[in-house]
Amino acid sequence: MTTLSMSAAAPRCFAVGSRAQSGGTRKATTAGRTARVSRARGASLIARAAFTPAGAKIAGVGMAVPTQYLTNDDLSELVDTNDEWIRTRTGIGKRHVISGDESLTSLAAEASKKALAAAGVAAEDLDLILLSTSSPDDLFGSACTVQAAIGATGALAVDLTAACSGFVVGVVNGVHFIRGGEYKNVLVVGADVLSRYVDWRDRGTCILFGDGCGAMVLTSTPDPSDCCLLGFDMHSDGAGNHNLTAQFAYEAGTDTAGKSKPTAEGGDAPSSRGAFCNIGMNGQEVFKFAVKTVPDTVSKSLEKAGMTSEDIDFLVMHQANQRIIDTAAKRFGLGPEKVVSNIAKYGNTSAGSVPIAMAEAVEEGRIKKGDVVATAGFGAGLTWASAILRW
Ligand code: ACO
């Protein structure tokens, strides 16, 4: 049933030099020796590359949100809006925003520690941390600061940016690293603090976004046919990028590339400066994109898994708008008992929303071992992705 078939066969390029030269001249002997050395090196590379394929399972999940939150009534004091409009059009009641010492790293570390505890995996046994985020604390990425905060000294830690699809893309990547046989324990984190980029004067966007983080620990199992990822489907369409952006812009006075120009006196101009703009969104276009792509991508993942919507125990999709969730659920004939929604409490936490919803559903005893969970993300990029997971 599984769609993944990662081969453990050694790449062909490692066989270069395996056909030894023969001949009686000194030159030929040298060539033969070189070939034997190459052959030996090739063999050792082959030996190292021949990882034993493994299965992968979901071992634990965790979540964290900031302590401070803003209700719809709070927002109605900032912009011309009201609780009734926000609830009816989006399903959102409040959203958490970072304050004080909180940061993307602190939230990600808290969620990761909970996921590791649930999984019974020690941080130092992690091989890889994939941090899906569009709002790192540092332009160079925050995965490494999360790694340091949780003490995962043996893990490679890297950021992955795919906006609200990021967590699903991260899980697919994480499972593949395990399936390949080289990594045993992978932490996938979905985290965003988009409140940093929200224009709190724009009622079209400030009502939607909240900060939060969720994490999942994936571990290997000896049986390669035992895989939690039953099917997946992932897409991008940069032609639609303009519909949802938070672009970098240069300060006025620098050239279009932002480079400082020589001054009339011959010296250098002050360094160019810039900053990321607030989130800009064409809500109606993103809405139309979401209600089309989410059911399509989940259908494709189900097909790849050899399943139908009747096999879905839970739908856990990106929490962007309750109406988008309802549309997808209706398309698959899923009643509220099979749909996980916590958008009322947290709003749209971007890459954090799917793992936060999963962690809550597990904590509440809804999602249990063996359940089939259909998950999907969509958002800026544009990107959209889905996966069918066996819990
Ligand atoms: N309060 C009151 N009125 C409002 C508000 C508000 N907060 N916002 C807009 N309105 C008004 C508009 O001005 C408009 O008034 P008008 O008819 O007098 O012109 C009216 O309400 C309707 O506006 P629409 O934009 O048509 O409202 P819509 O029903 O489309 O809802 C929303 C807007 C909630 C943004 C919706 O389009 C949406 O959810 N879109 C998808 C967003 C999304 O999923 N984003 C994913 C981002 S994930 C990521 O990658 C970061």
Image (cartoon, grey):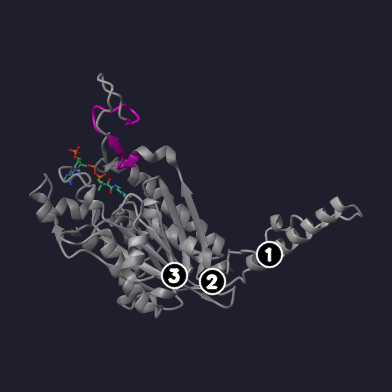
Residue at numbered disc 2? 227
Q: Position of residue 259 (x, y in %)?
A: 33, 30
**Residue 30 painted magenta:** no
The span shown in magenta is 243-259
Measuring 22% from the left and 50% from the top, which residue is drawn there? Answer: 196
Residue at image point 30% right, 29% down: 260
Distance of label 1 from label 2 (alpha carbons): 26 Å
Q: Is residue 255 magenta?
A: yes
Label ID, residue 154: 3
| Precedes in sequence: disc 3 or disc 2 | 3
Dot 2 amino acid type: Cys
Task: Tell me if residue 82 comes above or below residue 356 in the rendering.
Answer: above
Q: Is residue 46 left or right of residue 275?
A: right
Q: Is residue 120 visible?
A: yes
Alpha carbon separation for disc pair 3 and 2: 24 Å
Q: Along the polypeptide, which appears first: circle 3 or circle 1? A: 1
Residue 124 picture quarter: bottom left
Quadrant location of the N terminus in the rendered image: bottom right
Q: Which residue is mark 1?
A: 46
The residue positioned 72% from the left and 65% from the top of the image is 43
Q: Is the C-beta separation of discs 3 and 2 under 8 Å?
A: no
